[in-house]
Image (cartoon, grey):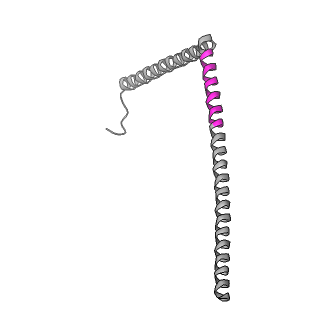
Amino acid sequence: MLGVELPNEDQTFLKMLRLRSLGLLRMQQRSFSRKIKQKLLRSRQQQQDPVVQMQQQELQLKTQELQHKMQLDTAKLQLEAEKIKATNQREGAKLGVKLATDLDNSQRADQQAGAKLGVN
């Protein structure tokens, strides 16, 4: 029933249950703490291992080489884009000159034809 105190034996049982739960929790915490310490120790030992150090250095070198290659590729692409831009400008200028020359030649031909018609 609600609001009724438990007999003394039940209260004692609950206290024992709580204490046991706390004891299990502390054991789990110690176990977890031990595992973390072991992992940290292994990690430190691996970092001191010459083979691991060499692997890390190789990885750093490969990373640097890749970054350098990416920079070179970017520079090459920019250079190619500039060449294409310059070629387009040059071709555009040639086309403009050709159109102007053709127009001038056409106008001269028209003037000469008009002059011939006027003379005749």
Q: Residue furthest front?
A: 120
Q: Position of residue 115 (x, y in %)?
A: 68, 84
Query: Is residue 58 rendered magenta in the image?
Result: yes
* Quadrant in which residue 58 is drawn: top right
Query: Is residue 70 rendered magenta in the image?
Result: yes
Q: Is residue 13 left or right of residue 105?
A: left
Quick one: quadrant of the C terminus?
Answer: bottom right
In front here: 119 or 53? 119
| Residue at position x 65%, y 64% in the image | 98
Would residue 45 be seen by someone viewing this image from the given angle?
yes
- Predominant secondary structure, magenta span: helix
In front here: 103 or 92? 103
| Residue at position x 44%, y 19% in the image | 24
In front here: 113 or 62? 113
Using the image, determine if residue 85 lies above or below residue 7: below
Q: Position of residue 31 (x, y in %)?
A: 49, 17
Using the image, determine if residue 113 lies above or below residue 14: below
Using the image, determine if residue 79 lies above or below residue 49: below
Q: Which residues are magenta?
A: 53-72
Quick one: quadrant of the N terminus?
Answer: top left
* Quadrant in which residue 48 is drawn: top right
Q: Position of residue 15 (x, y in %)?
A: 43, 24
| Residue at position x 64%, y 81% in the image | 113
Q: Position of residue 37 (x, y in %)?
A: 56, 16
| Residue at position x 65%, y 36% in the image | 72
In front here: 14 or 93? 93
